[in-house]
Image (cartoon, grey):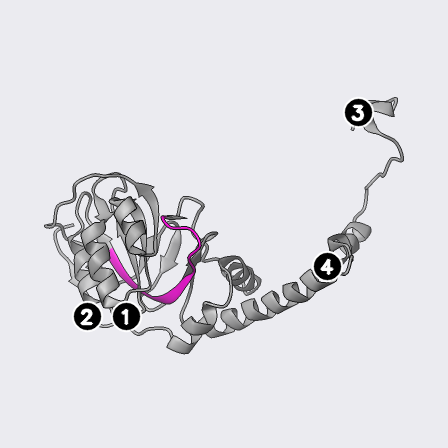
């Protein structure tokens, strides 16, 4: 790549939707998005550097050349308080995208979080500073600052399409991205799911079985070709399933 494209503005998902999204989990959001025919869940490689955090905010994006983080720094400079910086490097093993100095600046600006398909480093300091970072790798490797790339343009991060301004939510389970046009409805669906599970939790405390509450019993009853054997497997003469 010998040319860069940098968009200076981002049409962000509504701040009220981001605030509501903080009340639900990544799992609930993913389930709500999945029921609407969407995906948006990044892979299990994307892990938090600091446990116990939950964040939500609009995406600002950076696509960086191998071994280079110049476009990350440009996106960080353009980002606003509450944003989630989503960074992808062309060649994950080549050059750390995030470290302690970027962390200090991000926290000064009030960024909500950073999501990196690539390497983060200085992780002890980043954690001590309290910065919310998710990354696919931890590796102390030098990055240059001279490569072309893209800022605030669509990119694919860990298999998920992220458009600038989309809703990004992350917690201990991972990272999910919801298109900004669908975010309000998906968040409402996740809130409804959360409330149903709160009622289920109360029922479990009363002694009811999750087998009945979660729909497993009904699904099992509707299935064909299930043989239940009133014996232990060791006592069953056929010794085969």
Q: Mark 2 touching mark 4, by CB under 8 A?
A: no
Residue appearing at x 45%, y 45% in the figure:
44
From this viewpoint, is residue 13 visible?
Answer: yes
Within 10 angstroms of label 3, few (less than 14), some, or many (20 or more) residues?
A: few
What is the x, y in percent for residue 113? 33, 60
Residue nearer the viewer, 19 or 180: 19
Q: Earlier in the sequence, mark 4 or mark 1?
A: 1
Within 10 angstroms of label 1, few (less than 14), some, or many (20 or more) residues?
A: some
> Pointer 2: what residue?
8
- What distance separates the C-alpha of mark 3 from that of mark 2? 66 Å
- What distance separates the C-alpha of mark 1 from that of mark 3? 62 Å
> Pointer 4: what residue?
205
Q: Nearer the viewer, mark 1 or mark 2?
A: 1
Within 10 angstroms of label 4, few (less than 14), some, or many (20 or more) residues?
A: few
User: Could you tell whether 42 is left or right of 72 in the image?
Assistant: right
Picture quarter with the C terminus: top right
- What distance separates the C-alpha of mark 3 from that of mark 4? 38 Å
Q: Which residues are magenta?
A: 49-62
User: Could you tell whether 150 is left or right of 29 in the image?
Assistant: left
Q: Nearer the viewer, mark 4 or mark 1?
A: 4
> Pointer 3: what residue?
240
Relative to 222, say whether 141 is above or below. Answer: above
Q: Which mark is residue 81?
A: 1
Q: Earlier in the sequence, mark 3 or mark 2?
A: 2
Q: Nearer the viewer, mark 1 or mark 3?
A: 1
């Amino acid at each position: 790549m010998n040319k860069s494209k940098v968009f200076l503005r981002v049409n962000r998902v509504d701040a009220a939707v981001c605030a509501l999204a903080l009340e639900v989990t990544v799992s609930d959001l993913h389930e709500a998005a999945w029921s609407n025919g969407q995906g948006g869940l990044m892979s299990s490689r994307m892990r938090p550097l600091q446990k116990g955090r939950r964040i939500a905010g609009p995406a600002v994006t950076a696509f960086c050349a191998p071994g280079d983080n110049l476009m990350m720094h440009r996106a960080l400079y353009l980002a606003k308080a509450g944003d989630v910086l989503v960074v992808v490097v062309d060649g994950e093993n080549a050059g750390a995208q995030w470290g302690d100095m970027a962390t200090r600046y991000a926290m000064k600006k009030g960024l909500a979080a950073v999501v990196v398909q690539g390497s983060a480093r200085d992780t002890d300091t980043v954690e001590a500073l309290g910065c919310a970072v998710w990354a696919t790798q931890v590796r102390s490797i030098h990055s240059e600052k001279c490569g072309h790339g893209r800022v605030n343009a669509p990119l694919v991060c860990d298999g998920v399409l992220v458009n600038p301004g989309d809703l990004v939510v992350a917690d201990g389970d991972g990272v999910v991205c919801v298109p900004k046009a669908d975010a309000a409805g998906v968040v409402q669906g996740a809130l409804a799911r959360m409330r149903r599970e709160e009622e289920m939790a109360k029922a479990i405390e009363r002694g009811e079985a999750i087998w009945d509450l979660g729909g497993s019993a009904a699904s099992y009853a509707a299935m064909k070709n299930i043989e239940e054997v009133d014996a232990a497997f060791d006592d069953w003469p056929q010794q085969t399933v």
